[in-house]
Every structure is written in C-alpha cells, then in structure tokens.
Amino acid sequence: MKYFLIVKAGLQRKKATTILTILSIAAAFLLFSLGRSVAVAFNSEVEFAGNDRLVVVSSLSFTQSLPMSHKNRIEVIEGVDKVVWRQWFGGTYKERQNFFPKWPVPDNYFDVYPEWEISEDERRAFSNNLMGMIVGADLVEKFGWKIGDRIPIIPDIWPKADGTVWEFDLVGIYSDPSGNETGEAYIRWKYFDEARAFENGLVGNFIVRINNPDRADVIAKEIDSLFANSSDETKTSTEEAFSRMFAEQYGNIGLIINSVLAASFFTILLLTANTMSQAVRERTSELGVLKSMGYSDNLIMFFVLMESVLLCSLGAVIGLILAFVAFPFFAEIAGGFAGEVSFSISIVISALVLAFITACLSGLMPAYSAMRLNVVDALRKN
C-alpha cells in the first residue's frame, strides 16, 4: 500500500486517456458478461443430460414425427429398461417473450428422470387430470404460479381441432436437487393427441432409459438397425449429443460468442499495451529520477505492472456493474431463444481472472522496458 500513491499518480498523469481506456475495457467486459450468460444458458441442457438415456429421432430430421409402433420394438432390445415419448409443443404463454419448453408426455415419463423430485400425489394428480400440467420450480418462481392455476397457451405448431386456445391445470411442480435448471413444462399426451388438429398417433421422439450406460453406443446401433430401410428410419444418440444438437440449431453459439469476445479482448489488449507504452515513454525522466533515488529495477517494473492491473481491474468492475444493471432487460430479450439466462458468480470470477491476465499481458512489455531503462539516458531526456 505504501507504493499506491506512485501508481495512482501514474494513472492520473493524463486523466482523459486513463478514463477513455477504462471505459473501453468496461465495454469489453460488459459484452463478456452478457455473452457468457447466453453461452451458459445454451449449455445448461447439455450439462443436465443423463448418460443412461438415449434419444431416438427420425433420420431425416428431429422435427420429423415417428409412428408410435416403434416403441414396442425398441422395448424388446436387451439392455433397454424403459421407453417413453414426447413431442415439441411450442405455443405462447400470454406474450412471445415468455418462452419455455413444453412437452406432451405419457403419464410414466418421470420414471426415466429419477433425479427429479416430484411427490407421488402430484404424479397421481397428473395421471387423473386430462388437462394436467407439471412444471419446473424455476417457472413457478418466474411467473408466480401455484398449484391449481389454469395456464392458457396460444397454439402455433399444434392448433386444437376445435380452434380454441390450449388450457392446462397446474397439478405438480418438479425440482432438481443437483441445481440444474427446471424451466420446462410437461402436459398429458392423451389430452394433446386427442385434441390436436393433425398427426394424431405420431410422436416427436423417444427417450430410452438403458440399464448400462457403457453399452449406449451398442444399443443405439441396434435401435437404428431395427428400422433400417423402412419408411421411418431412426437416428439414435445419447441425450447429451441430442441436447447439443438441439441447442446448436441456432448455430454454433459457443463459437460465435467466443469469436466476438476474442476479437474485443485482442483489441483491448493492444489498446492497454499502447496506453502503458506511451505512459512509460512520456515518464522516462520521472522513472529515471525514481531510479536515482534508490528504487530498484524490479520495483519500477512492479509500478508499471500495477498500473496496468489497476487499469484493467477498474474497467472490469465497471463493466460487471453495468452488466448486472442491464441484465434484467437483457435476460428478457435473450430468454426468448436461449431459455433461462442467469448472471452467475462464475461469470464474475472468470471476468476478474480475465482482467488480471489481460493486465499482465498488456503491461509486461512496457514494464520490462521501464525496468531496463538506463538512469543517465533517462535523465538526459529531462
């Protein structure tokens, strides 16, 4: 702390340059924080995927429906424990930005997800109520729902045969003790299949729970061989692979975000390095005076590095604060295509670490130049 005044004086020497540099760094970390939150949201479904589940879809496209008869043939394969099915429902709850995944599923669907917590009473209520709906705890918190509420959904992909709006009774809430996001809703297959206007009897995909995850690839090939050369060929993959493919239907989100962030931080790296280099050149005589007073070369190098660290740290903190303030508005927009977007502590930690690395890289060469500065040459320029 006794050297802080020297570091502070170096930054205050040209206040306009320092302020503009800090604001540029803040803008980069604002982009980083918001961008990482979207990337985490896209990856959350992949991280959640179980290694003992397979997903069977049409070989043509995961949007192509499959006949229900596939279920009986898949069940007889050795190593298959249980087979359930589902269909992407779509639909809008009140407003378009209120996006969350909705799936019509059979009554025993939750048997293949034992990691979820849901009471037996709520499961019975789901089976006994034709219009029953079970939702995740995150959705309940987001929309303020409670058991017994009737949830209207405006159709888009699946209109009802009678042309009315879909309505569901909230009968259960599931949670995940492991901390994974619970932002999906499940409705009864029987109600959906009987009331929809077309494709009755067809399913979107099958979820297959297997006894031994080590045999996942073998069982997947056996499933696909059952329907090879038929009019409804299948493509079976692990739940993790399917979730990744489903998330990347918008494009390789990770690559896009990382490319934008890499470009912005490379620019910031050059900007900070240039600022520090210019500061060292303009303060050559001052640094020479410090050396003549007995300050060691290593200490001079430390001063310059600390200026760079302080510069990047201030920019990072300001950027994080701006991101935190703007996040509620950003999440409302981004949630429409990325699901549940959250501003996690991991984003803050990674931003601070990145700020330190950026400071060290950008300040290293100017600090080294200051360390090697000859006292006589430095004073001669005074």
Image (cartoon, rainbow, N blue to C red):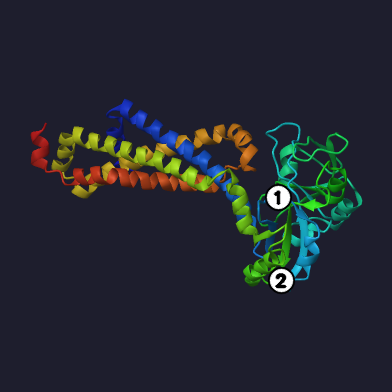
Residue at (27% x, 29% y) in the render: 13
Judging depth in this view, the residue of 362 and 318 nearest the camera is 362
Examine the rendering and report whether any part of residue 283 can be seen. no
Q: Is residue 1 left or right of residue 238?
A: left
Question: Which x, y percent locates residue 161?
Answer: 86, 38
Disc 2 packing (10 Å; few <14; some 14–19; many ≥20): some
Mark 1 highlights which residue?
64
Q: CA distance from mark 1 to mark 2?
A: 28 Å
Q: Is residue 129 above or below residue 236?
A: above
Q: Identify the residue shown where x is 48% and y is 36%.
A: 30
Position in image of residue 321 (x %, y %): 50, 35
Q: Which numbered circle lies on residue 248?
A: none
Using residue 260 as the reference point, say whether residue 79 is left or right of it: right
Label 1 environment density (alpha carbons within 10 Å; few <14, some 14–19, many ≥20) = some
From the viewer's perspective, tell me whether residue 145 is left or right of residue 55: right
* Depicted 11 relative to depicted 70: above or below: above
Of badges 1 and 2, nearer the viewer stands 1
Residue at position x 88%, y 36% from top? Answer: 162
Residue at the spot of label 2: 211
| Quarter where residue 282 is shown | top left
Pick whichever, 243 or 168, lies toward us: 243
Q: Earlier in the sequence, mark 1 or mark 2?
A: 1
286 or 308: which is nearer to us?
308
Residue depicted at 47% across the width and 48% down the height: 350
Amino acid found under the numbered disc labelled 2: Asn
